Structure formats: structure tokens, C-alpha cells
Image (cartoon, rainbow, N blue to C red):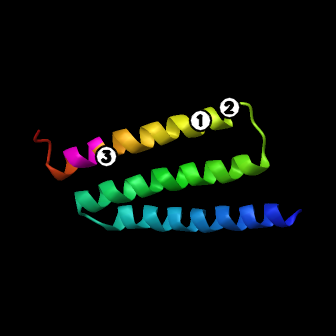
Amino acid sequence: MSAFEIVITIGIGMVAVSLVASMVLILRTKDFITRAVVSDMIFYSMIAIYLMWCLNNATSIAYEIAFLAAILGGVLPTMSMARIITKGRR
């Protein structure tokens, strides 16, 4: 195992710990706004884990998936969080 693989593994572990902590926060909180914000954090951490995994494992569609996740991660969560915060009003 090279030094780069060790650093990537440590990074994935750190992001996984924050992902688990975010899931615990979602389960413990009753506030819908906090749940919306933390759900975005979970989505972004899953994207980060995938991108770090792709650095060590070559796939043919790695960049396409990352591009799609970036588009969906920027537009859809922002709109859904706005709807949650305003309680469905437009």
C-alpha cells in the first residue's frame, strides 16, 4: 500500500465518521430545517467518499457520475431546502 492510498483511506475514514455523526444528528433532532441542512451534508459526504474512492479505482464512468452528482447536488437540494424552510409556500 502506497502513501497515497493510506492518505486516501484516512480521508475516507474521516468523511465516514462525519457521515455517521450527521445521521445521528438527523435522528436526534426534531427541527425540520436542521434535518434539511444535515441531509445535504450527508449527500455531499457520500459524493466525497465516491470521489476519493475513484482516485484509487479506475472506472470508465467515474467523471460522469461526479459531474451528475455536482449538478444534482447544487440544484435539487437548494430547491428542496428552500421549500422546507418556507413550509411549501412559493
Residue depicted at 71% across the width and 46% down the height: 54
CA distance separating discs 3 and 2: 26 Å
Task: Specify the label residue 78 is tagged with.
Answer: 3
Q: In terms of depth relative to the viewer, which is nearer, 15 or 78?
A: 78
Q: Are marks 3 and 2 in contact (CB under 8 Å)?
A: no
Magenta-drawn stretch contains 82:
yes
Stretch of the chain drawn in magenta: 79-83
Task: Specify the label residue 65 is tagged with.
Answer: 1
Magenta-drawn stretch contains 69:
no
The reply, left or right, for residue 75 in relation to residue 10 is left
The reply, left or right, for residue 61 in relation to residue 37 is right
Q: Amino acid at mark 3?
A: Thr
Q: Which residue is mark 2?
A: 61
The reply, left or right, for residue 43 in relation to residue 33 is right
Note whether 74 is above or below 44 in the view shown: above
Q: Are marks 1 and 2 in contact (CB under 8 Å)?
A: yes
Q: Secondary structure at mark 1?
A: helix
Residue depicted at 40% across the width and 44% down the height: 74
Magenta segment main secondary structure = helix
* Position in image of residue 75 (x %, y %): 36, 40
Q: Are marks 1 and 3 in contact (CB under 8 Å)?
A: no
* Position in image of residue 67 (x %, y %): 55, 37
Residue depicted at 14% across the width and 49% down the height: 86
Q: Amino acid at mark 2?
A: Ile
Classify mark 3: residues with Cα within 10 Å, few (<14), some (14-19) or many (20+). Answer: some
